[in-house]
Amino acid sequence: MKPTPLSIRIYRMMQNVSSTSPGINDQMALNNVIFVGLRGQKISVALLDRHVYLCGMTYFETMHRLLPRADDPCGSVDKMNCSVLVVHNNWIYTLEAKIYRFREHLMWLYDGEDQYYSSETRNYLTYSNPVPTKSQLAHMYRRQLSDLKTALSVGYLLNRTVILPRFNCGNVVQCPLNSLIRIRTFDALFSKRYRESSFLHHPRVPDAVKQSVSDHELISHTTRSLHTYNVNIVKNDDIIKLFRNSKHKVINLGILEGIEVTFKNSSAGTTLNERMRKAFKRANYRQRTR
């Protein structure tokens, strides 16, 4: 809408409709005003180019943009060569999931009071999800969530924020966290303890953070169990000793598959595990719970 006297009046009428009818959403309020409240008045309308103004389903799903791609001009930081002008962040439920999706696609600049992007004092850790084989697909979701729990446990012990990896939604499709769990529920307990997978590509993240990355596997592939159903136990004291002297802003733990963290203080471990149990609620990409 252009800021004409009529369009300003429309929004004031919408506000009145919303305040007197709490159960009505903004689209219904707009329809009510235009088709009932303004009956007989002339409204100038023009169709928008559907290739330039896209809905969330078309941009993110139909055009295969579950995650930003290096070969996609719309996936870059500046997006100067992107043919899309506006993306309507709809076809996904909850405010938390909308913000998360914008962050994943480098469409979010707000830094907040906690310096979400620009902090030079915050430390991070990250890890990677291996591409599953066909025989592993049946247990793929459970294993990936188990690895995320391990990363959150290590982050808790080292006071480091977890930078998410890209997740697998098949043996060829990579997807964001909202394809696995409900973001609103997860954010209620871990909103300050993680960052999206594209975080280190964001222009507001300091170079001092981007350039200070250390690769340090928690358990090397040569020592971990060869059987995927076995669990490699790592004690919390050993993790603290291992990374105590690390000065790097980002520690890459590599693959966490089959690794479980145990706590000497059973109370602390129980509390963290209970938080994760509550935080992990399965959902599909559009955030409908399963």
Image: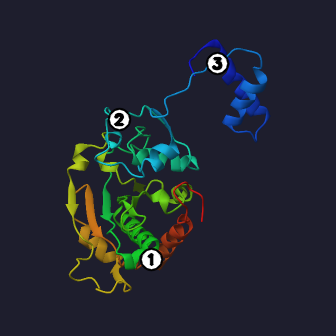
Location of residue 195 with respect to 33 vertically, above or below: below
The residue under label 2 is which amino acid type?
A: Cys
Residue 242 position within the rendered picture, expressed as x and y whole percent measured from the top left: 24, 72
Task: Give the foreground label among 1 and 2.
Answer: 2
Nearest the eye: 177 or 276: 177
Distance of label 1 from label 2 (alpha carbons):
38 Å
- Single out the residue that lies furthest toward the top: 5
Q: Secondary structure at mark 3?
A: helix
**Distance CA(mark 2)–CA(mark 3):** 31 Å
**Front label number (2 vs 3):** 2
User: Residue 30, position in %: x, y?
Assistant: 69, 30
Q: Secondary structure at mark 2?
A: loop
What percent of the width, then of the height, locates residue 195? 39, 53
Does residue 42 appear to the left or right of 287 in the view shown? right
From the viewer's side, name the closer residue of 31 and 110.
31
Q: Residue drawn 27% across and 82% down?
A: 224
Residue 219, picture quadrant:
bottom left
Q: Residues within 10 Å of mark 1 (few under 14, many from 20)?
A: few
Q: Which residue is mark 2?
A: 82
Q: Which mark is residue 8?
A: 3
> Disc 1 designates what residue?
139
Looking at numbered disc 1 in the image, what kind of residue is underneath it? His
Residues at circles 2 and 3 in contact by the CB criterion of under 8 Å: no
Q: Considering only order in the chain, which callout, 3 or 1, is on the residue closer to the N terminus?
A: 3
Left of 198 or right of it: where is 141? right
Q: Quadrant of the N terminus?
A: top right
Q: Nearer the viewer, mark 1 or mark 3?
A: 1
